[in-house]
Image: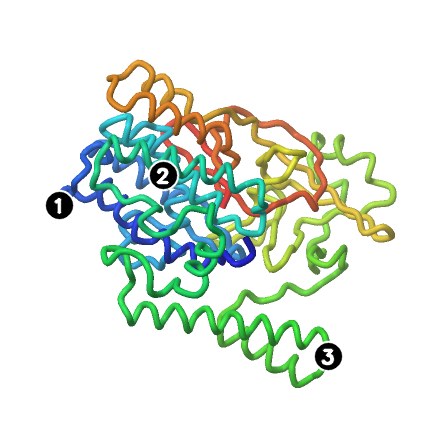
Amino acid sequence: MEKCHPDALHLLSEGVTCDLFKEMFWRSGTRVPELQVQRDALPDLCAALHKSTNYTYASKFVLGIEDFSSSTVSEKDVLMFVLFPLVAALQLCTDPLGNVCLLSYWILVRFLEKTTDLKDDHIPLIRGLAYAMKFLWCEVSRTLFTLKTHIYPAKDPPITDQLLVSKVFTVGCNYASPRQPQTAKRQFFIMRKEFYNMMKKEAGRTANPIFRRSTKKLRVVLRIGKEIPVHLTLNSTWYVPTSSAILFQSMHGAHQSLLLPYRRDWKFSLRMCCSGTVYSSRYYWKRRSETMQDCVCLAEGDNIIFGIVIAFAFERRFCESTVLLDEFVTENPFDSLHSAICNGPSRARLRALNALNFAQEHNCFFKRVSGLRLVVENTFDILGPAILLHHSSTSFVSRL
């Protein structure tokens, strides 16, 4: 699993993702009418993307559909992570089967993309998702590409490792293979990132001022996000930045009541930093820019929850921290799609239900929002930024 780098996945999935976007939004030369998005739904769909909030320090930006042709591979993936489940949840494809086709591909790539979270027991799940997608796609249209076009089955790890690492720039079908100049550019980009990470590690290990100056210079050249000055380090990844304090008495009454147990020995902050990502309060952080970092996803046991950051509390002696959230009350966003498949034509119904059930059962990335409630959670359970999407009167939240 540690050999399946995200950059390799971008190259493997780029051709399929681009093909699906063309089938959804291009009217000429399309081969799968089931995937076409309804014309009258496009203005509201574009508006939902434009109104979505991006994140200054997350290095993930959700662009518009009109920016697709000039987007990088990773930007196309981020757009796909948000757009495909939104289209499926709203049933915007002309055929319900098209919505399930998009959904099955989306959930598979989302699992593969989280390489740091993958374990050996995830292999049967990923294989099941891939087979469900492949069989559905074959029944909908023989012209659809599947990940089998790009990678071998996971039951043969040596072949898969060789493909993902050694031959990532040379294998694959001609339709999806990158051109040579693009390949060279990506290789150079990956090499620069690896070189910077090695320099940073060596600077921390040796404390050599030459390494530190070189690493700082590389950060500027590579345009890696600037570091926020540290006020208090909590652990190896989390710290409280400077100029982030907030007084307890300046908060709203409802917020004070939940943070009252922490008033005596704890301090309160508007921001927290973790591995280069800054999370800030939507209510009290006033230094606004075009992008904010207040929507987050957290681990709660085996589940994932989403919420809006209100304030952080931290304790200096034991380096503990909690976060006050407006937690989203969420529900299954694909229940109406399930009903449409059950009540629709019989063609590929069983395949579609199988793929849809797989996606619904293992979906921890995209939810429909039905309400809010105030909660206090462990700050260190934050997994990363999320994004809130509004379409007409319905709201959705998606993990980035």
- Whether label 1 touches label 2, CB < 8 Å: no
Q: Which residue is label 2 attached to?
A: 84
Taking the image as shown, residue 94 lies to the left or right of residue 398, namely left
Q: Earlier in the sequence, mark 1 or mark 2?
A: 1
Q: Position of residue 370 (x, y in %)?
A: 51, 24
Frontmost residue, 306 versus 326? 306
| Point 34% across, 30% down: residue | 100
Q: Of circles 1 and 2, which is in front?
A: 1
User: What amino acid does circle 3 point to?
Assistant: Thr
Density class for disc 3 (Cα within 10 Å; few <14, some 14-19, many ≥20) is few
User: What amino acid does circle 1 point to?
Assistant: Gly
Taking the image as shown, residue 375 lies to the left or right of residue 62, namely right
> How far, Cα to Cα, is label 2 from label 3?
46 Å
In the rendered structure, find residue 29 and report the number of the disc placed on it: 1
In the rendered structure, find residue 206 and report the number of the disc placed on it: 3
SS for callout 1: loop
